[in-house]
Amino acid sequence: MKLGALQSLLAFLGRLALVQAKATVGQAIATLENSNSSLLQYPTQFTQNIVPKQIHSHNDYWRDVPFLTALSYGVASVEADVYLINGTLFVGHETQALTKDRTFDALYIQPILQVLRLTNHKSAFTGNGNSANGVFDTNSGFPLQLLVDVKGDGPTTLPAILQALQPLRAEGYLTTFADGMLSQSAVTVVGTGNTPLEGVKALEPRDFFYDAPLTQLNDPSLNTTFDATISPLASTDWATAVGWSGIGTISEGQLANLTQFVGDAHALGIKARFWDTPEWPIFARNAIWKVLAENGADWLNADDLEAASSF
Ligand SMILES: *[C@@H]1O[C@H](CO)[C@@H](O)[C@H](O)[C@H]1NC(C)=O
Ligand SMILES: *[C@@H]1O[C@H](CO)[C@@H](O)[C@H](O)[C@H]1NC(C)=O
Ligand SMILES: *[C@@H]1O[C@H](CO)[C@@H](O)[C@H](O)[C@H]1NC(C)=O
Ligand SMILES: *[C@@H]1O[C@H](CO)[C@@H](O)[C@H](O)[C@H]1NC(C)=O
């Protein structure tokens, strides 16, 4: 049978029935799958079947393929450490790990843009003014969170980050706060590390947000009324904020802290994340993930994405 000549599913099934009186549905599926029929292809299938999950890919650029490996597990938040050197943002954990090729644009902005162009395929069927799809075809309203960990000086790095985001901004893919309205789009970009709070607050429109200190959301010395228009995310170090090892039973005081910090964030419409949760022993890591999920922490901070995505 010449499979490339396949015109339609019905014609194919009719022929299969003629040729093979005992053809099974399994054979029909296998034959069609091998046929490269246009009937079995659709434009937004790049992330077919991937269910998005509230997992944060810690130091994402360490993975075999930055961003795409996380995407393949449905991980909806990725973190890139950036250094501004001679006008370019480079990605790496420390300066010894930087290379000329591993730029923020090459590892994150361009791959994210390419995936979004696939999930936002334009054709005679799409009108103007559609809101942008996210990277996940199974849940197109689920935004990707891009966490930018600023190394080096915050105020000098901020303009370079805003400029680096321009390709995503130009196509309407950035969550933006403008004229008193927060409009969610395909990618929400949040600055952490040395990101300058005052610099982020001054942005108008604002499409780069601030990872707020989870234990200080109501601290008057920060001179800030935190909410989701400044900080969709607030984070803190697990060891100092809660400190449970995951072995034995969490203490009342530790649990009280956990629920208080999560509650403070949620009262302001902010998502809560604890970083540096222990990765080992595995049973302790899992016990902490369970306590986090049961008490409303919004993101699981993970190094092992395969384990977190099947948790
Ligand atoms: C499969 O079909 C698409 C168009 O529908 C075509 O671009 C592609 O080259 C084909 N692939 C093979 C292996 O024939
Ligand atoms: C940055 O610029 C200085 C001065 O031109 C040069 O010596 C240095 O090698 C550059 N660094 C990188 C990483 O390109
Ligand atoms: C808050 O405002 C006070 C008074 O203007 C100032 O001294 C302080 O540095 C500010 N704090 C921060 C974190 O900006
Ligand atoms: C609870 O949080 C406070 C403030 O961050 C901290 O000082 C205290 O040690 C924490 N308590 C426990 C039991 O972790």
Image (spheres, rainbow, N blue to C red):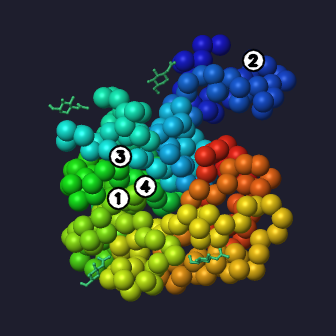
Between 126 and 144, the one lying in front of the other is 144
Residue 194 image label: 1
User: Could you tell me the amino acid type at mark 4?
Assistant: Leu
Mark 4 or 1 closer to N-term?
4
Mark 3 or 1 closer to N-term?
3
Residue 19 image label: 2
Residue placed under numbered mark 4 in the picture: 147
Pinpoint residue 84: horizontal percent, then vertical percent. 27, 44
In front: label 4 or label 3:
3
User: Could you tell me the amino acid type at mark 2?
Assistant: Val
Between 35 and 281, the one lying in front of the other is 281
- Any part of residue 241 in sight: yes
Badge 2 marks a residue whose secondary structure is helix
Residue at screen point 42% across, 65% down: 211
Along the horizontal axis of the image, is 107 left or right of 246?
left
Query: Quadrant for ligand 4?
Result: bottom right
Pinpoint residue 300: horizontal percent, then vertical percent. 62, 59
Residue at the far top in the pictured view:
1
Mark 4 or 3 closer to N-term?
3
User: Could you tell me the amino acid type at mark 1?
Assistant: Asn
In front: label 3 or label 2:
3
Residue placed under numbered mark 3 in the picture: 82
In front: label 1 or label 2:
1
Mark 4 or 2 closer to N-term?
2
Mark 3 or 2 closer to N-term?
2
